[in-house]
Image: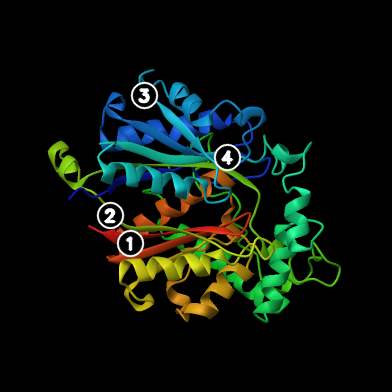
Amino acid sequence: MRDAVIVDAVRTPIGKRNGSLADVHPADLGAHVLKALADRVGFEPATVDDVVWGCVSQVGDQAGSLGRVSVLAAGWPESVPSSTVDRRCGSSQQSVHFGAGLVVAGQYDIAVVGGAESMSRVPMGSAARDGAPYSASVLERYGVDDMNQGFAAEMVAAKWGLSRTRLDEYSARSHERTAVAADAGTFEGQIAPLAGLRHDEGLRRSTSVETLANLKPAFRPDGVITAGNASQISDGAAALLITTSELAAANGWQPMARVHTAVLAGDDPVMMLTAPIAATVKALQKSGLSPQDIGAFEVNEAFAPVPLAWQAEFGVGDDVLNPLGGAISVGHPLGASGAILMTRLVHHMRDRGIRYGLQTMCEAGGMANATILELL
């Protein structure tokens, strides 16, 4: 029976909005990690069956099938095809699912998966600027005038009783954990420096509960969601090589992890940030594992209520939930975030000898991916 293994994973440092990576075309962000991956592993790009690439805002600089343009920008042979995936924030995690599934099915032997997003060059919401993403029939079905992630985050905080102080405490912890990991050199083996940037640019070492408390609510005058307890707008890219154990051995490659379980879930599209809970339940049921079997959880920090509500449902310890910080401390470059998180997760698992890791992402429209990796 065929399996799907991750041979290696590499990412750019995450650049803050209008920061060090703002002048880099998103196709060149992608090209950079594609070339870095090939150099690290030593594979011939011509042997790649497909490059499955995540990107959310597919307009402007990201309109031309970003995966294909990135392949060409990397100087790879014209014979290497690519597809560009949009599952909102989970786009490049879905790229992993598509690549792994097709490898297991025997349709691909070697797949490169990942994604890129330049939110500096293509601002969030650009694709919907001149349209109405939710039709009147959908809004009527749910009895709302709009579906907004910020309002959804407020709803999640209210439902799980998460105070402003609790959210700010979590957010300060995210920066602290990233600072500790960065100072220990944890990210050096996974980052391909670019444009003079060697480290994730959004980290604010001076962040504290006290400084976060001074920020004004972003969505409601009496709300609890601020710029400080939400993910940062940013730029970045990541790429992973997926093949089978047999083919990896034949090429002399030592895989890092197996894609053990990959699932999807849908949930309330108004309170659209809760689907990671349903996706995690589904992943655990499908895998036969329990939360106690998992040594590291990456629950994307789109807003602080997302991982905290998730944690309340599963009762996992603080030590295994987002152990390296997350999107609050370093940023959330939309279509790249799934692959960036998975790169961080698989390297963390290898560094710490963790057998199982689980990653899940909330996505607009009330969806989520969940992926369980097994260390090899």
Instruction: List the residue tagged with mark 1.
Output: 349
Q: Secondary structure at mark 4?
A: strand
Which comes sooner in the sequence, label 3 or label 4?
A: 3
Q: CA distance from mark 4 to mark 1?
A: 25 Å
**Could you tell me which residue is drawn at 72 percent across and 43 percent down?**
125
Q: Secondary structure at mark 3?
A: loop
- 202 up-or-down from 75: above or below: below
Residue type at tag 4: Glu
- 46 up-or-down from 122: above or below: above
Instruction: List the residue tagged with mark 3.
Output: 80
11 or 87: nearer the eye? 87
Q: Secondary structure at mark 1?
A: helix
Q: Nearer the viewer, mark 3 or mark 4?
A: 3
**Could you tell me which residue is drawn at 47 percent across and 78 percent down?**
314
Question: Residue 185: which quarter of the image?
Answer: bottom left
Residue type at tag 1: Met
Location of residue 340 in the rendering, given as x and y in whole percent from the top left corner: 47, 49
Is the residue under label 3 in contact with that under label 2 (CB below 8 Å)? no
Instruction: List the residue tagged with mark 2.
Output: 257
Disc number placed over residue 117 in the picture, else none: 4
Circle 3 crowding by C-alpha within 10 Å: few under 14, some 14–19, many from 20: some
- 67 up-or-down from 160: above or below: above
